[in-house]
Image (cartoon, rainbow, N blue to C red):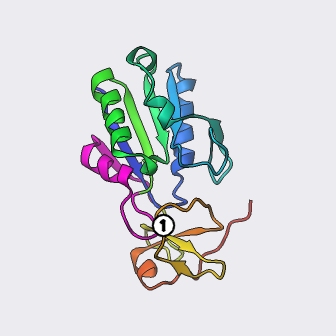
Amino acid sequence: MAKLWFRYGAMGSSKTAQAIMTWYNYNERGKKCLLVKSDVDSRDGKTIIKSRIGLEAEAILVSELCKMSREELIKFDAVVVDEVQFCSKSEIEFLVKIADDYNITVLCYGLRTSSTNKIFEGAYWLFAWANKIEEIKSVCWCGDGATHNARLDKDGNIIKEGPMVVLGGNDTYVSLCRKHYNQNMPKGYVKVKN
């Protein structure tokens, strides 16, 4: 029986890199795997998934996936979804249907919470319905596990209010442990130059 997986982690934990590698591994082994991304994530273009370390692949949008018929989908052995936190409840329900009704493995990668410390809708429903849930580990500047995504203003201060969705990368966000998030201490963070 196919499973619905949710692999979550703080920003910078390699979720997108792992999603691309999983998709690649399926295809390399002769399996058909579909790579999907959230419609909301347009940072690298409408249909491009790109990791911080430079891995890149073409994907379809979740909205396109949800329009696919059973006949189109059963050609695939697996579906990999990146930035799944931005999905709606109905989109997560469709992922459940793919796993349960079409017997296709679905591997989802995304954030648990926003920089305002609120759970994303897609993450909420995956925590409720996924067969397997795994945390992808990341570290705070202090060395402890990073669990919070801190959005920074132009002066490097943490912004804890405002919209849940503000697209950005290393220039906008830093992953922190709960202690340093709550203490508003993004200091000690070092940007890695590519």
What range is drawn magenta here?
Answer: 112-137
Q: The C terminus is located in which quarter?
A: bottom right
Q: Quadrant of residue 73?
A: top left
Residue nearest the viewer, comparing 7 with 60: 60
Residue 127 in percent (x, y) is at 29, 50
- Magenta stretch contains residue 191: no
- Magenta stretch contains residue 120: yes
Q: What residue type is disc 1 on?
A: Pro
Residue 169 in percent (x, y) is at 62, 61
Residue nearest the viewer, comparing 120 with 1: 120
**Please, what secondary structure does the residue beneath circle 1 have?**
loop
Residue 2 left/right relative to 79: left
**Label 1 sits on residue:** 163
Q: What is the residue that sits farthest to the top in this orientation?
A: 71
Residue 135 in percent (x, y) is at 38, 54
Q: Is residue 193 above or below residue 44?
A: below
Q: Residue at x 47, y 39 (%)?
A: 81
Q: Residue at x 67, y 44 (%)?
A: 45
Q: Is residue 128 above or below residue 57?
A: below
Q: Residue at x 39, y 69 (%)?
A: 117
Q: The N terminus is located in which quarter?
A: top left
Residue 106 in percent (x, y) is at 39, 34
Residue 160 left/right relative to 28: left
